[in-house]
Amino acid sequence: MPGNEIDAYIAGQLDPRYTGILGALRTLMAAHAPAAVEGLAYGSPAWRGAEVFAVVSQSKTHLTLAFERGAEFEDEHGLLEGVGKRTRHVKIKSLDDLDEHALRDYIEQAVRLDTT
């Protein structure tokens, strides 16, 4: 089962201080991208529809939620970072940092773009 890949990632590779953040992101994805398949891509937790559309990676100071076609998003929340042609990301340092309203919007945009 694909979700078990992420469970194994959490158990073996994720810094424990990010467990709550990744759990919240999984919940948001399940609610707003219900058809997406959860698994690993590039060695990190990811969600796939027609293609991989979101990937979480960790650093020493935060988790990064990257959207593969984020450069095409409308960013009324002003949280997206990055300057490349395709990907944009949001850095999340703590659960308090997690803006559910903005992330829900970004996830829904990612799902719409994944179907086009």
Image: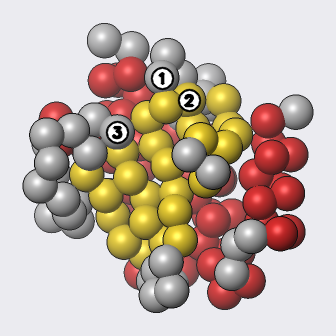
Label 2, on which residue?
A: 48
Residue type beneath disc 1: Glu
Q: Could you tell me which residue is drawn at 63 percent across and 51 percent down?
A: 43
Percent position of residue 4, x then y: 86, 46
Label 1, on which residue?
A: 51
In contact (CB < 8 Å): disc 1 and disc 2 = yes
Residue type beneath disc 2: Arg
Percent position of residue 58, x then y: 53, 71
Query: Front-most of 42 and 29?
Result: 42
Q: CA distance from mark 3 to mark 1?
A: 9 Å
Q: CA distance from mark 2 to mark 3?
A: 10 Å
Is the N terminus in the top left, top right, bottom left or bottom right quadrant?
top right
Say left or right for 32 vs 90: right
Look at the numbered disc 1 and give the secondary structure of its residue: loop
Residue type beneath disc 3: Glu
Task: Tell me which label, 2 or 3, sits earlier in the chain.
Answer: 2
* Label 1 packing within 10 angstroms: few (<14), some (14-19), many (20+): few
* Residue at the extreme front: 42
Percent position of residue 86, x then y: 21, 38
Q: Could you tell me which residue is drawn at 15 percent across and 64 percent down?
A: 78
* Label 2 packing within 10 angstroms: few (<14), some (14-19), many (20+): some
Q: Could you tell me which residue is drawn at 69 percent across and 81 percent down?
A: 15
Label 3, on which residue?
A: 68
* Label 3 packing within 10 angstroms: few (<14), some (14-19), many (20+): many
Task: Tell me which label, 3 or 1, sits earlier in the chain.
Answer: 1
